[in-house]
Image (cartoon, rainbow, N blue to C red):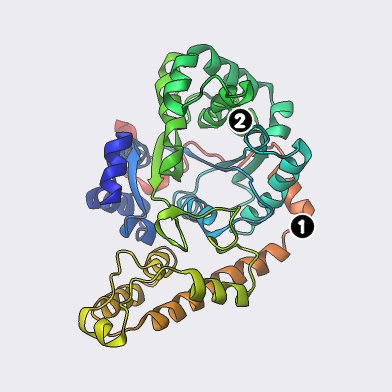
Amino acid sequence: MPGLLYIEKFGSSALTPDLVRRLEAATGKPAHHFLKRGIFFSHRELDRILTLVEQGKSFYLYTGRGPSSDAMHLGHLVPFLMTKWLQDVFDVPLVIQLTDDEKFLWKDLTLDQCHQMAYDNAKDIIAIGFDVNKTFIFSDLDYMAQCSEFYRNVLRVHKHVTYNQMRAIFGFDGSSNTGRIMFPPVQAVPAFSSSFPSIFGTREDVPCLIPCAIDQDPYFRMTRDVAPRLGLQKPSLLHSIFFPALQGAMSKMSASDPNSSIFLTDTQAQIKKKINKYAFSGGRDTVEEHRSLGADVEVDVSCMYLRFFEDDDQKYEETIDKYSRGELLTGEVKAHLIDVLQKLVLDHQERRKLVTDADRELFMTPRPLNFRPDALKSKQDKSTVNAS
């Protein structure tokens, strides 16, 4: 299983059914299908966050986005959908980092281009439905100039991480520009509550949970390693699998290849064409063979995408079962997926139209959020809270 390979490679812990049930008990809500279907499959100390919740204490969420094109694709959407659900069920504040500085250092783009892409992506993110009273979205290019505490934390991390450590974790070599070498601490410090004095005041002890794709884990292994040396909290992590390209499971969607991706700006016709033309099929060569053997649902991209975006468990399970037994043909499964994705993208586009520059400016203004350290106490038995 790819999930097991990732866990072995990165040394994280499996997200077990018992832990998912514990999360359900802590929130009083059914688990998101991303959790039940193994899309988020790995973690680092999620159990510590749940213990805090069970004790009536709070935490905050942190996720991010590296702007790389004018539009986000479905793969970019996954961690934000998970984060939105976590914000809703735990009722906690959220910070979202837009790493326009990182993109400038890695891509052949101007600073102004990277900055504008971050602003455009911010509107896509706002359209997902985050609570403006609990969400702060920031561009690194903006926030580094607005908040000295953020930059102070960056410097503190720099001082405790050597070049040899950076090279071992991120593969830097003699040809790497110095900006790339200095960037990882910039992605690390949003995991420390003291980087956001407008939200947390002078508190340095507010725990952080980071939902992210598994390939972001190296940044936060470094963060977790350095945090105790700074007297700060280690962040907890929740990892997702890679979102595959239309061409198959061994590839990853790319914003630079329009035919590998479904973009949030795609038309209904473009979505239909891309799925029908490019989505790798696990169906057999002939109808007779397919009816006899069934589809290979493990390699079929339509099945993979339904795993992510068909939120009705019964519909999803019936489709996979019938397709694997040959009762459904590839065209029928693709038609189902097209319906799901067309609705998902159209709904997002309609919400995106309603997001104004004023909305974006409000989300991106450093300000107090509705952070209450004891926000969850009312849900807990008093004696449990006192015992903590």
Q: Position of residue 12 (x, y in %)?
A: 31, 36
Q: Position of residue 344 (x, y in %)?
A: 54, 69
Quarter of the figure with the C terminus: top left
| Residue 24 falls in image quadrant | bottom left
Q: Residue at x 32, y 42 (%)?
A: 6
Q: In this view of the protein, can residue 383 be seen by the observer?
A: no
- Quick check: 354 above or below 176? below
Q: Report how far apart the C-alphas of labels 2 and 1 lie in the structure.
A: 25 Å
Which residue is tagged 1? 356
Which residue is under mark 2?
A: 196
Give the residue displayed 61% in from the left and 76% down from the top.
268
- Between disc 2 and disc 1, whose residue precedes? 2
Task: Give the x, y percent position of residue 221.
Answer: 40, 29
Q: Which mark is residue 303?
A: none
Q: Amino acid at mark 1?
A: Thr
Position of 355 relative to 163 (above/below): below
Between 247 and 165, the one nearer to me in the picture? 247
